Image (spheres, rainbow, N blue to C red):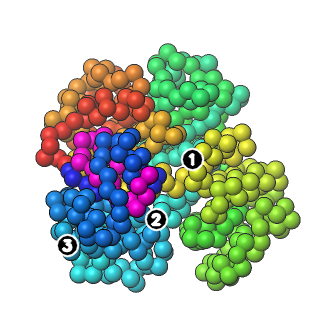
């Protein structure tokens, strides 16, 4: 496919990287020549410098024969106009836009993006994606990472093993035998700074951060086996009542059990807006790092704190302050990838990266044929790829033990005719199966070869 990616920031760069790896013809557009140069130097893509919404720039990018355009600049309005120009002037058949402003996505204005008005096929909202990720973290507070796969029937959960984990020093092969009915597979292990795909004889040790692929119904049991118990979240403090914080609070208000919610917002006008929009949430105006205000919000009795302001350092420090005050679970929104590695030393339980969630969401909407979803682990150290087994794939008809997976790849799970299947060596993959494969970044090309399909699928 010929695809134009508008915006060479972190989101655009990551999308271009994924798509270029699949032998698509990618052109990336940005006003910053340094960002365009970075993309063309590090990726197999072409670059054009200029405003993506300008027809002459899109023409130079090859819009006349492009199959798709992805508008992921920092401006909602530029993204919308770019999609309009691509459709009206160049007849690009599929357009995707990243839009941050909530009002653009209200149901009463849904007609705005019809073909007769602003022709955008898919709208990606970073705020909604981040809100969804935050709520998933609350659903599984014992996990530091959660991602849905296979239409929600399976989850990838990241768990840090403590000294009291009952299965430490036990070979994974023996764990499989001990818990033969558990539909879960340890697909990745981070030990120190090293991330690897484990072998059957590998053991797990205290301090390991393991990534487990499991059927949704078996996640609670899996966590218990690893020594984790998921407490019910009844009291939540949300720091930051911007678009993300407000969306999370609204969702929490609608949840069964009616959790008690306190929100803290520094900006008075924004706090008043949130107070009017929310029905059962108490909104406090002030600094989320103020110990007295945290005390007023009941942080010592809270089950979780979500730091969701637009400032990374505030989110991290507020999470630390909340933990010091006695809150057992802290979740922080962090944009800067360089700060993510500080989360564990600071005692922050989970980090939400808006760029990573947005990239994953966009990829879900543009994949065709083999790949249905991608979840990035760490700083692009590994991925979990969900794909369909097609008739031209080397996987079709092969037993798992016969498949020549690279050393850094593991098959995590199979969805067959709507039913989840835990893979074993004798499991034979069938055409139409949905598979989830963990792979280290260096082994992605080999996994792609295993998933290769005829050109007509793209």
Name the spot of residue 146 as percent of width and height, x first.
52, 46
Q: Could you say whether the residue bearing mark 1 is in a helix, strand or loop?
A: helix
- The region drawn magenta spans 15-35
Q: Nearer the viewer, mark 2 or mark 1?
A: 2
- Mark sitting on residue 337: 1
Name the spot of residue 77 as percent of width and height, x first.
41, 74
Q: Could you say whether the residue bearing mark 2 is in a helix, strand or loop?
A: loop
Q: Name the residue under label 3.
A: 89
Q: Could you say whether the residue bearing mark 3 is in a helix, strand or loop?
A: helix
Any magenta on residue 18?
yes
Name the spot of residue 375 as percent of width and height, x first.
43, 45
Q: Residues within 10 Å of mark 2 (few under 14, many from 20)?
A: some
Q: How far apart are marks 3 and 2 (CA)?
A: 23 Å
Q: Nearer the viewer, mark 1 or mark 3?
A: 3
Compared with 298, 183 (above or below) is: above
What is the quadrant of residue 114 in the picture? bottom left
Compared with 384, 35 (above or below) is: below
Q: How crowded is mark 1: few (under 14 residues within 10 Å), some or many (20 or more)?
A: some
Instruction: Compare residues 68 and 158 and report the one nearer the observer.
Output: 68
């Amino acid at each position: 496919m010929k695809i134009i990616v508008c915006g060479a920031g972190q989101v655009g760069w990551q999308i271009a990287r994924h798509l270029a790896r699949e032998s698509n013809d990618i052109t990336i557009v940005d006003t910053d020549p340094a960002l365009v140069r970075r993309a063309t130097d590090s990726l197999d893509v072409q670059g054009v410098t200029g405003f993506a919404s300008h027809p002459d720039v899109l023409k130079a990018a090859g819009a006349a024969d492009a199959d798709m355009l992805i508008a992921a600049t920092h401006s909602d309005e530029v993204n919308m106009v770019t999609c309009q120009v691509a459709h009206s002037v160049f007849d690009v058949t599929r357009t995707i836009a990243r839009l941050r402003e909530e009002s653009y996505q209200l149901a009463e204005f849904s007609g705005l993006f019809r073909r007769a008005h602003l022709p955008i096929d898919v709208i990606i909202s970073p705020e909604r994606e981040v809100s969804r990720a935050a709520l998933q973290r609350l659903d599984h507070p014992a996990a530091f990472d959660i991602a849905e796969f296979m239409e929600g029937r399976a989850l990838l959960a990241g768990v840090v093993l403590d000294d009291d984990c009952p299965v430490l020093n036990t070979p994974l092969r023996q764990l499989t035998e001990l818990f033969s009915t558990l539909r879960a597979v340890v697909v990745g292990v981070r030990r120190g700074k090293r991330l690897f795909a484990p072998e059957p004889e590998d053991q797990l040790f205290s301090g390991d951060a393991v990534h487990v692929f499991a059927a949704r119904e078996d996640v609670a049991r899996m966590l218990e086996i690893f020594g984790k118990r998921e407490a019910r979240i009844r009291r939540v403090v949300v720091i930051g009542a911007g678009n993300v914080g407000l969306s999370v609070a609204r969702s929490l208000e609608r949840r069964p059990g009616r959790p008690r919610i306190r929100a803290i917002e520094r900006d008075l006008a924004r706090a008043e807006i949130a107070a009017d929009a929310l029905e059962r949430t108490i909104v406090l105006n002030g600094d989320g790092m103020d110990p007295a205000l945290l005390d007023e919000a009941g942080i010592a009795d809270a089950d979780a704190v979500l730091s969701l302001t637009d400032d990374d350092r505030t989110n991290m420090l507020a999470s630390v302050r909340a933990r010091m005050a006695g809150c057992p679970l802290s979740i922080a929104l962090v944009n800067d990838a360089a700060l993510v590695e500080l989360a564990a030393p600071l005692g922050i339980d989970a980090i939400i990266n808006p760029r990573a969630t947005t990239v994953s969401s966009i990829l879900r909407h543009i994949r065709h044929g083999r790949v249905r979803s991608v979840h990035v682990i760490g700083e692009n150290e590994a991925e979990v790829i969900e794909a369909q087994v097609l008739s031209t794939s080397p996987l079709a008809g092969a037993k798992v033990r016969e498949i020549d997976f690279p050393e850094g790849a593991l098959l995590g799970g199979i969805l067959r005719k709507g039913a989840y299947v835990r893979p074993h060596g004798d499991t034979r993959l069938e055409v139409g199966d949905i598979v989830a494969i963990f792979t280290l970044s260096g082994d992605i090309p080999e996994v792609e070869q295993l998933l290769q399909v005829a050109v007509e699928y793209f």
